[in-house]
Amino acid sequence: MGTPLFFVGIQVFHIIVKTHGTMRALLALMLILFGSFGLAQNDSTIRFVFIGDVMGHVPQIQSAYDSSTGRYDYTDVFSELKGLLTSADYSIANLEVTLGGEPFTGYPQFSSPDELVDGLMAAGVNVLVTANNHSVDRGGNGIRRTIDVLAAKNLLFTGTFLDSTDRSIRNPIVLNKNGVKLALLNYTYGTNGIPVPSPYLVNMIDTVSMANDISRAKALGVDDIVVFIHWGNEYERLPNIQQKRLAGWLQGKGVRIIIGSHPHVVQPAELHHYDNDYRLIVYSLGNFVSNQRRRYCDGGMVALIDLKKQNGKVEVVGAGYIPVWVDTYSLNGKRKYKVFPVGMYEGKSNQLLSAASDSAFKVFVDDTRSLLNANNVNFPEIRLVDGEWVIPSVNRSVNP
């Protein structure tokens, strides 16, 4: 028989009192006894990390090029997130570029080196969504090559398809672990006016098609459905009426998790409970990595969600967000990019960043917290406590 949790907590309390003082010890004891938990998870839960827009502007491409090898390397860009992303069963990102091959290009029609995906995978990303307004930037050949590259790397992905047969196989994709089975669907509002050439397909926001997809997902016997959707207005920090209406429609069809992208800025998140049910919406994750340096666009957030199946029903047992910020700096005369989880570097950013970067970092942090503290519902920031991300337990009070 294992040691009771109460006595484990008391042991930890005494140890931390000796090393860190009474107040920190009390915090640790409360976290143990009252439900908040770190990134370690038990076998009955499944963890998702949702990641925002992965962009590939020309300066990013130039930064990744290694003239000594003639190759591209993005590993260091995402290295600070590896511990966080690998803690999840599924880390899911919006790939907002094509892998269309050379010549590599940035805005307005993106084609990034394949090594961009290698960098994401090295950090722990194992699922990509590909339906967004840049899906057809390199035409049909770009769609095909992107699909071929991702398939060769054994990644799970959905959103763009070679043809109707391919769509029937990968729409939805099913994520199944620890007894929890979820369907992932992905849609975009459009493709910047570029027609999708036959026989290729891009999942568009169309309620008839979406209703059919949701019905098909339910027929697969999944516990929940996740819709990762490219919507909203760029650079607007609050969801518009169309987003809210579409979210309500999706919820009415039984979709319980909605994750948004496209605005390139963070928008609020809401987790509501209704009797024995829940609904979770993250309206926009913002940018994960890009060269956009204007205010509000130089970072985003990652959303962590822990699900647990109990008595045949899945519920959210932990949820929250971690702000991330993109640093651009010079190394050996070359511009470099690195994504930082805010909580890990807050308080010592002035030791790591230039004065200009430190100032931008602090503005982003203040802007993000101000917006989300005022508008989020049951979706708090995940804080770093003694070197460990602590996910708050979910408030299950029922909404009226």
Image (cartoon, rainbow, N blue to C red):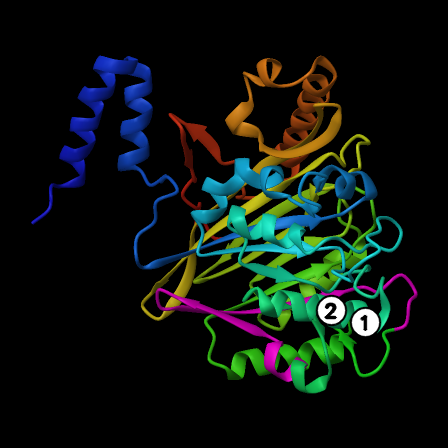
Q: Which residue is mark 2?
A: 145
Type of residue at label 2? Arg
Closer to the camera in the image, 394 or 302: 302
Q: Determine the residue located farthest toward the front in the rendered image.
A: 68
- Horizontally, residue 13 falls left or right of residue 338, namely left
**Residue 155: in sight, yes or no?**
yes
Figure quadrant of the C terminus: bottom right
Question: Relative to 383, does residue 92 appear above or below in the rendering?
Answer: below
Question: Relative to 90, does residue 368 appear above or below in the rendering?
Answer: above
Seen at 66% across and 82% down, the residue is 166
Seen at 82% across and 54% down, the residue is 110
Secondary structure state at the residue bearing disc 1 = helix
Q: Are marks 2 and 1 in contact (CB under 8 Å)?
A: yes
CA neighbours of label 2 inside 10 A, class few (<14), some (14 to 19), many (20+):
some
Please report the bounds of the magenta region as a residue range: 167-195
- Horizontally, residue 166 falls left or right of residue 180, namely right
Secondary structure state at the residue bearing disc 2 = helix
Type of residue at label 1? Asn
Q: Give x and y (percent) for residue 352.
A: 59, 18
- Horizontally, residue 133 falls left or right of residue 276, namely right
Closer to the camera in the image, 203 or 313: 203
- Residue 141: image tag: 1
Disc 2 from disc 1: Cα separation: 6 Å
CA neighbours of label 1 inside 10 A, class few (<14), some (14 to 19), many (20+):
some
Question: Relative to 35, does residue 279 appear above or below in the rendering?
Answer: below
182 inside magenta stretch? yes
Question: Relative to 107, does residue 183 appear above or below in the rendering?
Answer: below
Q: Give x and y (percent) for residue 364.
A: 70, 27
253 inside magenta stretch? no
